[in-house]
Amino acid sequence: MSFLYIFLGLILLVVGGEFLVRASVGLSFKLNLSKMVIGLTVVSFATSAPELLVSIQAALNGFSDISLGNVIGSNIANIGLVLGITAVIAPLAIDKDFYKFNWPVMMIMSGALYFILKSGNEISRLEGGGLLAMLFIYLYLLIDRARKSIKTHPVDDGVDDGLSKSSNFKIIIWLLIGGAALYGGSELLVKGAVDVAIIMGISERIIAVTMIAVGTSVPELAASVIAALKKEKAISLGNLIGSNIFNIASVLGITALIQPIAVKSQEVLTNDIWWMLGFAAILIPLAFLPKKFEIGRIKGVFIVIAYCLFISMAFLAN
């Protein structure tokens, strides 16, 4: 029954996330926001909703290891699983924005998270507010850079024009379905994960950093693989890096404002976060060696093997 809860929870999170993205984009058009702003901010927030709901639900129920494990594990999965598998199917091109802006911001956010957790063994409400403030600075710089570059290099923002014609009634229905599915999915997923951890004698932290993290990364993985197989523009490296930044700043920031997140397992600091930092740091040498500005199949295989090693060691250490 516990595994059924997890399965149903993940399905509801995927469905809820999809409806929330539709509703958010439709509403943004009603508010006359530009497609560029919608693509860079609204869609990013909406696609982080599954992680956010799971983290808030876990923190409110006293399972802060799941809140932290979910975000740290998702960030590892975004690189090790999503980026790795996508690169195996179709090589990923790297632009200058990656190493001049997105990657440094991700490393700063990741480092900030480590020092926040290390200093007080928790993310307090004040520190959660600090993470959100860092997010707003990042968004301002991101939009500013996009506005300057779009004049000379028009880009595909990935926003569906058809949603601009959505009626207010449709948007409200999508919001209600999305909200209800996300809430129900987070409830089932957290309950199922805790039950499985108790039955199998595995810590909540390990369940969160592996099963839950992979589950909340499934939408990104599915979208990337489908795009790569169709030889269309696959999910960009910048989008994955942006997702990791949003996970730390918005998911943990908002969750901490609602309920401070305590570090219950020291392995979060001695193991998990170092894997997250390692996967983030290795992208720079991979980006330039041996072939510059591309993460191809061999590099993709290397990343996936490293992710499999992380998962194996997580369970063996238990």
Image (cartoon, rainbow, N blue to C red):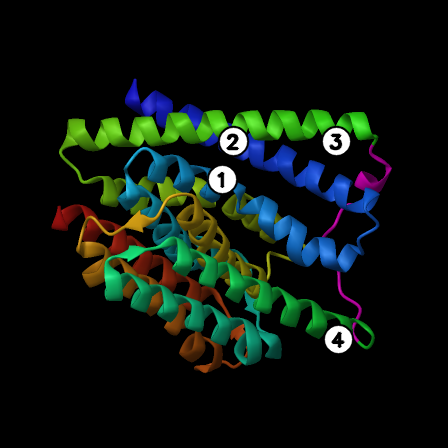
Q: Is residue 216 above or below residue 146?
A: above
At a point 36% along the width and 70% down the height, the residue shown is 111
Between discs 2 and 4, the one toward the N terminus: 4
Q: Amino acid at mark 2?
A: Leu
Q: Secondary structure at mark 2?
A: helix
| Mark 4–mark 3 distance (CA, rounded to whole Å) | 32 Å
Residue 278: which numbered mark, if any? none
Asked if residue 161 shows in the view, the reply is no
At a point 59% along the width and 63% down the height, the residue shown is 136
Q: Magenta stretch?
A: 153-166
Q: Relative to residue 160, is residue 304 drawn left or right? A: left
> Residue 307, image x and y in percent?
32, 56
Residue 50: which numbered mark, if any? 1
Quarter residue 114 falls in: bottom left
Are the residues flagged by discs 2 and 3 in contact, CB closer than 8 Å? no
Q: Secondary structure at mark 1?
A: helix
Residue 149: which numbered mark, if any? 4
Between discs 2 and 3, the one toward the N terminus: 3
Main SS, magenta region, reads loop
Say which residue label 2 marks: 182
Q: Amino acid at mark 4?
A: Ser
Q: Relative to residue 52, is residue 229 drawn left or right? A: right
| Mark 1–mark 3 distance (CA, rounded to whole Å) | 19 Å
Say which residue label 3 marks: 171
At a point 86% along the width and 37% down the height, the residue shown is 165
Between discs 4 and 3, the one toward the N terminus: 4
Q: Residues within 10 Å of mark 2 (few under 14, many from 20)?
A: many
> Residue 30, image x and y in percent?
83, 42
